[in-house]
Amino acid sequence: MNRPSKGLAALLLTSALGLAACAPAAPSSSEAEDDATQTEATTEETKAETEGETTDGGEDVTLKVWSWRTEDVAAYNKIFDVFEAQNPGITVEFEAFQNTEYNQVLTTGLAGSDGPDVPMVRSYGGLQPLVEAGQLEPLDDKVAALGELSPGVLSGSIGVKDGKIYAVPLATNTLQIFYNKAIFAENGLKPPTTWDEFISLNDKLLEAGVTPMALGAKDDWVLPIFADIIGASRYGGAQFEADVLAGKKDFNDPDYVASLELVAQMKKYLDKDVVGVSYTDSQVQFVSGQAAQFPGGSWELATFRDQAPDLDLGVYTVPLPPDAVASAPVVPGFIDGNFGVNVKSEHKEAAYKLVNWMATAEFGQLLADELNRFSAMPGVEYKDEVMQQMWAPYEANMAPYLLLVDFRYGDPSGTAVLGKEIQRMFLGETDAKAAAATLQDGVSQWFKPKS
């Protein structure tokens, strides 16, 4: 959805003043007379080069911002209206593409001359191909606020080889289970606090003829998410991550295998043809009341409310399973998305203004209020009740969404391998132990522990 241009103010005024301050002393009258013709020619060339970024009477600057969030177009347009009001003459043209097509669309756009000025880019391993291709500007010296963020928040925005920051982190995603309060009330259920209660409520829903959980297993990328929602506490969350990165454990570890066995046990609580259900179909199942629960990420909240404004939602963290390594239920999470600056952008000064604004609490608050997202920026308040229910447990006992945070830096990625293996588990073609072994074999092709 494109918006018309709104007009440009003096975007390059600061740059012009800086150039004037650095200019050499004025020439003598004879030198000035000799240079008059050349000066006139140079002025015309400068006008042609700057085009829409002139300070007086020039055309407006339009920044193209690309994203994979097609469902967020209206909200982002509203958010960018605030930036435009503060920066007269800069128009933000927000365009979103299908999530499954975005990586290729962005690769093509950045390689050509008609790509975005400010692209939304992936985090962690998904960012690295763009960094290594030299397609993003380093922002260390361009966005001062980035220096105030914690290493954990910045970890998804950094080039692994040079350690530079290549994007402004967007949001923190948490992983948990959404539930339909009306269906729970109709069946005398409440959010579980123990594993036995968790199993009991799913059994009761099954007995009542209600699909306990909606899961789109046809799209394999959702399955590692499901695995961490169910099993991260069982294998140990952040401590297991530390042990794997240090080479003390790997994915053949009995506790990790046990976490996948829990995932396999959940199959009876899913759609009978779960591997044939797409991600979008699972969303429809939940918002239409065909399923009582939806295991997913915090980013789903805005979508659910858009699709079903009257749906009364709640969320809970899966309780500790038997023999859990963690001492309390952990909430997996990760930094989702960044905004960078295209090295080929013809409007870099305006682009830097935009990403600097994206690194403010003001932008973060708009993100929270308009899109129900947890901003990566400090100083943001979450007034929404459901958001508070997700954020408080995450702050209390956070863990990384392991395969995305640490195992997307090579081929095959951990998420790609495990997604296919869980599909095979649901189809009865493999078991948890073999799935874990396949995961370990896959990531071992490129991952080397720190010793």
Image (cartoon, rainbow, N blue to C red):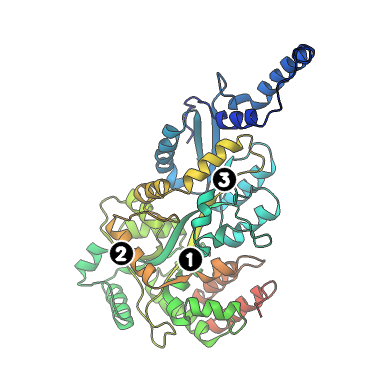
Label 1 Cα neighbours within 10 Å, binned few <14 / some 14-19 / many ≥20: many
For the residues marked 1 and 2, what is the alpha-carbon distance in whole angstroms?
Answer: 26 Å
Q: Is residue 448 left or right of residue 386?
A: right
Q: How many marks?
A: 3
Residue at the (22%, 62%) spot, across then down = 182
User: Where is 137 relative to 378, above or below?
Assistant: above
> Type of residue at label 1?
Ala
For the residues marked 3 and 1, what is the alpha-carbon distance in whole angstroms?
Answer: 29 Å
The answer to which image quadrant residue 82 occupies is top left
For the residues marked 2 and 3, what is the alpha-carbon distance in whole angstroms?
Answer: 31 Å
Where disc 1 sits, the SS reads loop
Residue at the (60%, 35%) spot, across then down = 347
Q: Earlier in the sequence, mark 1 or mark 2?
A: 1
Q: Which residue is mark 2?
A: 389
Q: Which mark is residue 217?
A: 1
Q: Earlier in the sequence, mark 2 or mark 3?
A: 3
Residue at the (62%, 40%) spot, across then down = 115
Q: Which residue is mark 3?
A: 119
**Mark 3 vs 1: CB contact within 8 A:** no
Q: Is residue 314 left or right of residue 20?
A: left
User: Where is 262 relative to 85, above or below?
Assistant: below
Residue 378 x %, y %: 41, 56
Q: Earlier in the sequence, mark 3 or mark 1?
A: 3
Q: Is residue 406 left or right of residue 303?
A: right
Residue 68 x %, y %: 52, 49
Residue 203 x %, y %: 30, 78
Instruction: Give whichever of 310, 152 is nearer the camera.
Output: 152
Instruction: Give whichever of 98, 349 is nearer the camera.
Output: 349
User: Where is 6 relative to 291, above or below?
Assistant: above
> Type of residue at label 3?
Pro
